[in-house]
Image (cartoon, rainbow, N blue to C red):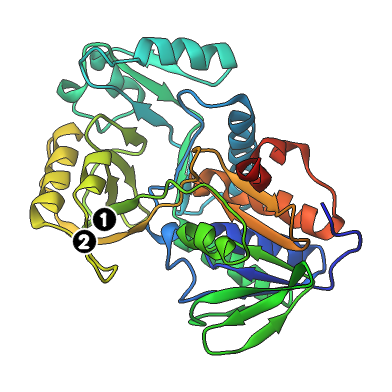
Amino acid sequence: MHAPTRPSKVIVVGGGIFGVSTAVHLARLGIRTTIINDGPLANGASGRSLAWLNSSRRRSDAYHRLRLAGIDRYRTLSAKYPDAAWLRFDGGLTWDADDAGNEIAAVFDYERNLGYHAQLLAPENIAGTTPGVDARSVTPQGAIFNPGEGWVDLPLLIGVLAEEFVALGGEIVTDAGRATIDVEDGRVRGVTTSNGTRWQADAVLLAAGGAVPAIVAEAGQHIGDGTPIALLVRTKPIDHPLKAVLNTPRVAIRPTPDGAFALDSAWSEEEVIVNADGSYDIKSSTLEGLLQEASKVLEGNPKLEIGDYGVGPKPIPGDGEPVFGELQALPGYFVAFSHSGATLGLIAGELLADEIATGKRHPLLADFRPERFSR
């Protein structure tokens, strides 16, 4: 870390969960902070995230620890808002395809050895633990139920955090267009928006989702980028008993606060058409196929209808691990770029705000520094 003194003014570029979470934590520390976003808040990946709160399956030890801390912060938030419809802990249920790649037994042993709460359920026993699943769709190897998992509606959470941010004196500038990070004499000086407005600052956090690698490259820095184009479909509300998040071979499903379902999958992402002008097209067969796959795994095989859908970049670093912290070569220039934005949103904002304010690197972020891409 380069910042030896507490900054008096910080600009946060990005109105998603990383940006707004960090901004409200900075405001709580008494630091004058402005959020600048290219559109309304939550208009990027945070607005089309499945937002499953979890640390299931295999990942690096450091990533697992960070995700567990992330879930812990949501538990604290849940205690503050016990009746919130936008944050639920009703567990997650996962099963694999019935083929040679099925890892359910091995994953169950792995999670149990870590102390991650997991139950291995035969198809016929699922209904007694978590209702709403068509047991016929579960493969013979069974499914893992993780009782401590949950989900969050990120746009609604961002709204709650933004309200607190403004009450603490923070400033939010929306529809500002694309931002450029101003670097002079080897350090950050502020931000210039596409309309020519210049915002001076002692430190800047770039939390612009899938655009982070390209914006960082403008300053001659490199962050590996594996960002795909993702599709999230929201159904119309339906009366159904499912409360858990489902992660299945052909579709992932989570409930929404209004009684609908949010759906995504790997195969539907691959069918998104990216046009030469950067716009996207979604085939009706893709949308209908996703609804059908969801119906197959839901109890009663209900008829599902499209409510709306979102499509756009899903931020994923080139090595799959999060990128958090100050650019080593550019004092005052901080970045937040990661998959699992929902799970990490609160903890990342807390730790980044602390680093910006104090100049001390937090050990939980030691394995996720941006300089690993320049080694």
Residue at screen point 45% across, 51% down: 315
User: Depth check: 83 or 98 in front?
Assistant: 98
Camera-side residue of 279 and 23: 279
On the question of residue 183 being in view, the answer is yes
Q: Earlier in the sequence, mark 2 or mark 1?
A: 1
Q: Is residue 70 left or right of residue 194?
A: right
Residue 175 point in image, percent of width and height: 48, 82
Q: Dividing the image into 4 quarters, which one contains the C terminus?
A: top right
Which residue, as the protein is rendered here, is positioned at the far right?
Answer: 5
Q: Which mark is residue 307?
A: 2
The CA span between labels 2 and 1 is: 5 Å
Residue 357 vertical position relative to residue 285 in the rendered view, above or below:
below
- Looking at the rendered structure, the kind of residue marked 2 is Gly
Q: Are marks 2 and 1 in contact (CB under 8 Å)?
A: yes
Is residue 36 visible in this depiction of the protein? Answer: no
Disc 1 secondary structure class: strand
Q: Identity of the amino acid at label 1?
A: Arg
Q: Please, which residue is most extreme toward the bottom here?
A: 196
Viewer-closest of 213 and 290: 213
Instruction: Estimate how packed mark 1 is, as few (under 14), some (14 to 19) or many (20 or more) residues with alpha carbons within 10 Å.
Output: many
Q: Residue at x 14, y 50 (%)?
A: 286
Q: Position of residue 113 (x, y in %)?
A: 56, 11
Q: Look at the numbered disc 2 and give the secondary structure of its residue.
A: strand
Q: Position of residue 272 (x, y in %)?
A: 21, 54
Residue 362, above or below 12: above
Residue 270 horizontal/vertical position (percent) = 23, 46
**Numbered tag placed on residue 234 in the rendering:** 1
